[in-house]
Amino acid sequence: MTVRRLKTYASSQGFAYQYYFVGKQAVDPEGTEYVFDVTSDRKLTYPVRIFVPTTAVLAWAEAHLRSLSESEQYAAVKLRLFRAFDEASDMQAEGRELQVDATFLEESLASLGVA
C-alpha cells in the first residue's frame, strides 16, 4: 500500500487546494509528464498533468552548461502547479493539462536561486 503525503496550498483566488504527487512518466522523446491528484472541496479529486518538454530541459542545460537534476525539474513542476492554483478561477475546468515551457523553467528556477 502506498502512503501519499497530502499537502495543502492556499491560492490567491481564495481556494485551499489539497494535492499529492501521483507519479511521473517519460513521454519519449517529447518529455516527461508529472501527475498530481488535486481537490479543493475534499470530495472530488481530479488529476492535473504537467508536461515538461525535452526541448525546455535541453535549452536550460545548454544555457547553464550543466544538466538539470530531477529534484530541480520537480521543483519547477510544483511551481507551475502553484501558479495554476493562483491563476485559474476554476482549476478543475481550466488547469488539468499544464506545461512547463523553457521560459517558465528559466524563471522558476531563477526564483529559487538555481543557476
Image: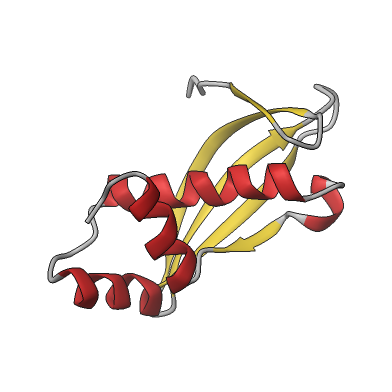
Question: Residue at the spot x=26%, y=50% of the render?
Answer: 114
Residue 50 relative to residue 75: left or right: right
Tell me what residue is drawn at x 58 percent, y 21 percent: 6
80 over 104 or under it: above or below: above
Residue 39: percent from left, percent from top: 76, 32
- Residue 74: horizontal and vertical position, in percent? 39, 47
Determine which quarter of the picture holds residue 65: bottom left
Tell me: 74 left or right of 84.
left
Q: Which residue is located at x 65 percent, y 38 percent? A: 37
Residue nearest the observer in this picture, 9 or 26:
9
Where is residue 87 shown, x and y percent of the image? Answer: 74, 50
In which quadrant is the C terminus drawn? bottom left
Residue 19 appears left or right of 51: right
| Residue furthest out toward the left | 65
Image height of 8 relative to 100, above or below: above
- Residue 46, above or below 61: above
Task: From the top left corner, tell me how far across and down residue 14 is, in percent.
Answer: 81, 29
Residue drawn at x 28%, y 76% is: 58
Depth check: give the residue in front, 105 or 25: 105
Q: Is residue 16 left or right of residue 53?
A: right
